[in-house]
DNA sequence: GTTGCGTTTATTTTT
DNA sequence: TAAACGCAAC
């Protein structure tokens, strides 16, 4: 590999292979390139591929990194490299060793919907009749504790907060239930992997010997569990290279600990620190705006982004009347700019703080017939029909998975109503037997009538029959197809759909599960049902598997997404909308102290997504819960120096310079002529 | 077992 | 405003 294409700090980062390295990579400084080059460099130095581990947060990032490395060294040399997300890596560790922690190896993974169901049932027993609580918050408190490696016993009970109190009581029960169901949630995947590595010397040694060179992307987003996992893995050799940008840490609310990156040099004495400050993405004006905003944060590693390129267009800041006006203005500009610079729809991104803000833009885009993709929002695997189908598969793999079992027990209806289900659950609780065992032996529940008893027996028979069929991994797809058909899942969808159109959409979602399975079978040499479920559980919002090439971001469509999901991406033109107090900073986050910093970082992330043109918008007033309210511009706007800023309103579009106008007219006529075939 | 009505509540969400 | 949930009535 030729290092000459890299700038001096980039080269230094690639060459530093032994010992801890902190790579502070500013936005757009080519860090992915450095990581891939570093992997290639290690390979060229003679390090065996299977000794290199690169960890990312998203599947997408992992996939891209793998593709880039393979493109440079070829498939053969790259074989054996482990490039994976934290969760996939931890899952791997768990699948091999979780029995030491008292779980069975076929454990289920619970997503948020499963968690809510479980907590709801647990809370029901703890709360007096009729009293309600915020399940999401309970769950959030538990998750937060787990992210910080706080055990149920250590969970501090807060004063005067009934929800914290309740959470403290739910947490241990929740963990017990998960264990009884042979299930883990997303937080547990990391947590238990850490416990395994920490407490089981043999396991720890195995993995420590396995990986000799570790690389971590987006280190600023790691939480306590991830931090400890890395520490344990690199202990003997300390060949740990972490890459990140403290200025882009925006997941503090989710347990990410900025201290991990800020204290790296203390945690790993002798660490080398390299800063990447040259930006290859944005114009000078955009960078000036970004630098000016972020420098107002106190606790940070000083960095100043610079570019060898020119200033470019000024950053545009527009005042709009309301949300509709804002949407109109943005869509109008997309029209004009696309034409003017010959851009594609996918070159434009609309970024907002909260997902509800997408609405006005969606409506306007649809009205103007402009294709768009919405990133985030409701997740594919959270849809009912998909969850149902997967729940069936999960019960086949892990019959103790009671959340899934209860979900499908009477879906589609098969005559196991609430009364029957209650009797079964009570019997299971009374005898301390897993629910599935009770189902297999319905004779043992005397209060069951003949009909329900037969219904249960029929259900069990069908499940056991398919469990046997799935045990031979051959013909996985056919078996699944038969299974779903026999269950009548599709009929059930049409029966319960409110209108035929919705039914069709939901049936397509169900078909998509089989497509995902087909794609998995095709790709994996050794396809198994548990393997498929693992893959599916760890998938992100990048749509179900499909073929690798086609995903939301490769379609030619305007991209709409939250600031959080925009991290790591870039677009020629970015519209940062709703820059108002209450949105950015968000009203709920202007509580104590440092939270404002995270909001500012979010703003910084948004600004630095733009390559050529950045437009900042805010509205004078906005409807809130149905009421029109006056709005105040975000204080972050005032932090941008006026010499890089051009201010305007949505009404008066700054006029194009005359030569541009001429050019546009010329382009227009040229286009017309070619359309008319002249 | 289903449907509908009133009540409630409204961040961000890599896995 | 609107969506999601729980409860009550059919």
Image (spheres, coloured by chain):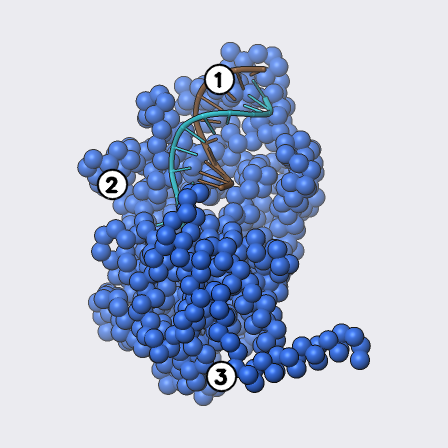
Chain colours: A blue, B cyan, C brown
Label 2, label 3: how far apart the Cα atoms are: 51 Å
Q: Quadrant of the C terminus of chain A?
A: bottom right
Q: Are marks 2 and 3 on the same chain?
A: yes
With respect to residue A456, does A157 lie above or below?
A: below
Nearest the viewer among A539 and A372 is A372
Q: Are marks 2 and 1 on the same chain?
A: yes
- In percent of width and height, residue A300 lies at 26, 68
Residue furthest to the front: A652
Identified at 51% across, 63% down, the residue is A329
Label 1 crowd (10 A; few <14 / some 14-19 / many >=20): some
Frontmost of labels 1 and 3 is 1
Identified at 60% across, 63% down, the residue is A557
Report the residue marked by disc 3. A1
Tell me if residue A76 can be seen: no
- In percent of width and height, residue A357 lies at 46, 53
Report the residue marked by disc 1. A423
Label 1, label 3: how far apart the Cα atoms are: 68 Å
Circle 2 — which element? Answer: loop
Confirm or deny contact between disc 1 and disc 3 (CB under 8 A): no
Circle 3 — which element? Answer: loop
Total numbered circles = 3
Circle 1 — which element? Answer: helix
């Amino acid at each position: 590999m030729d290092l000459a294409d890299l700038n001096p700090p980039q080269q230094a980062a690639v060459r530093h292979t032994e010992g801890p390295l902190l790579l502070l990579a500013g936005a757009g400084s080519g860090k992915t390139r450095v990581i891939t080059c570093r992997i290639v460099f290690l390979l060229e130095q003679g390090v065996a591929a299977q000794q290199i581990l690169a960890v990312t947060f998203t599947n997408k990032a992992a996939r891209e990194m793998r593709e880039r490395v393979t493109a440079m060294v070829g498939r053969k040399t790259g074989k054996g490299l482990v490039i994976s997300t934290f969760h996939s890596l931890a899952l791997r560790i768990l699948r091999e060793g979780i029995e030491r922690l008292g779980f069975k190896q076929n454990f289920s993974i619970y997503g948020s919907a499963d968690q809510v169901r479980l907590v709801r049932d647990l809370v029901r027993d703890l709360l007096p009749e009729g009293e309600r609580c915020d399940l999401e918050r309970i769950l959030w408190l538990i998750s937060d504790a787990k992210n910080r490696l706080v055990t149920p016993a250590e969970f501090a009970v807060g004063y005067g907060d009934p929800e914290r109190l309740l959470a403290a009581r739910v947490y241990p029960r929740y963990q017990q239930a998960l264990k009884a169901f042979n299930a883990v949630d997303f937080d547990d995947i990391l947590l238990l992997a850490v416990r395994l590595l920490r407490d089981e010397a043999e396991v720890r040694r195995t993995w420590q010997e396995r990986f000799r060179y570790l690389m971590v992307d987006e280190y600023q987003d790691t939480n306590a569990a991830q931090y400890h996992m890395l520490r344990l893995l690199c202990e003997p050799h300390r060949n740990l290279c972490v890459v990140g940008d403290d200025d882009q840490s925006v997941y503090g609310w989710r347990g990410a600990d900025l201290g991990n990156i800020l204290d790296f040099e203390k945690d790993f004495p002798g660490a080398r620190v390299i800063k990447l400050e040259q930006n290859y993405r944005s114009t000078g004006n955009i960078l000036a705006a970004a630098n000016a905003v972020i420098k107002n944060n106190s606790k940070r590693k000083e960095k100043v982004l610079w570019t060898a390129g020119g200033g470019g267009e000024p950053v545009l800041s527009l005042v709009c009347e309301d949300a509709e006006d804002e949407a109109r203005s943005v869509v109008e500009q997309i029209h004009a700019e696309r034409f003017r610079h010959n851009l594609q729809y996918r070159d434009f991104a609309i970024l907002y703080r909260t997902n509800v803000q997408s609405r006005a833009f969606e409506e306007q885009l649809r009205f103007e017939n402009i294709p768009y993709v919405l990133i985030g929002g409701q997740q594919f695997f959270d849809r009912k029909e998909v969850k149902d189908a997967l729940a069936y598969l999960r019960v086949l793999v892990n019959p103790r998975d009671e959340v899934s079992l209860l979900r499908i027990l009477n879906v589609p209806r098969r005559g196991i109503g609430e009364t029957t289900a209650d009797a079964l659950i009570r019997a299971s609780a009374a005898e301390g037997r897993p629910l599935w065992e009770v189902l297999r032996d319905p004779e043992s529940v005397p209060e069951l009538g003949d009909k329900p008893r037969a219904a249960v027996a029929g259900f069990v028979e069908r499940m056991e029959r398919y469990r046997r069929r799935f045990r031979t991994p051959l013909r996985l797809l056919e078996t699944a197809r038969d299974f779903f058909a026999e269950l009548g899942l599709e009929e059930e969808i049409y029966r319960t759909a409110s209108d035929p159109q919705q039914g069709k959409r939901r049936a397509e979602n169900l078909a998509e599960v089989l497509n995902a399975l087909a794609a998995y079978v095709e790709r994996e040499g050794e396809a198994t049902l548990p393997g498929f479920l693992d893959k599916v559980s760890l998938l992100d919002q990048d749509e179900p598997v499909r073929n690798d090439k086609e995903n939301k971001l490769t379609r030619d469509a305007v991209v709409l997404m939250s600031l959080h999901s925009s991290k790591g991406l870039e677009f020629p033109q970015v519209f940062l909308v709703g820059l108002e107090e209450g949105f950015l900073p968000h009203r709920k986050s202007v509580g104590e102290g440092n939270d404002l910093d995270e909001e500012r970082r979010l703003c910084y992330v948004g600004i630095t997504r733009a390559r050529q043109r950045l437009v900042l918008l805010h509205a004078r007033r906005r409807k809130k819960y149905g009421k029109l309210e006056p709005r105040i511009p975000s204080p972050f706007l005032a932090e941008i120096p006026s010499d890089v800023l051009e201010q305007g309103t949505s009404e008066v579009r700054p006029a194009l310079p005359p030569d541009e106008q001429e050019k546009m007219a010329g382009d227009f006529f040229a286009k017309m002529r070619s359309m008319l075939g002249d």
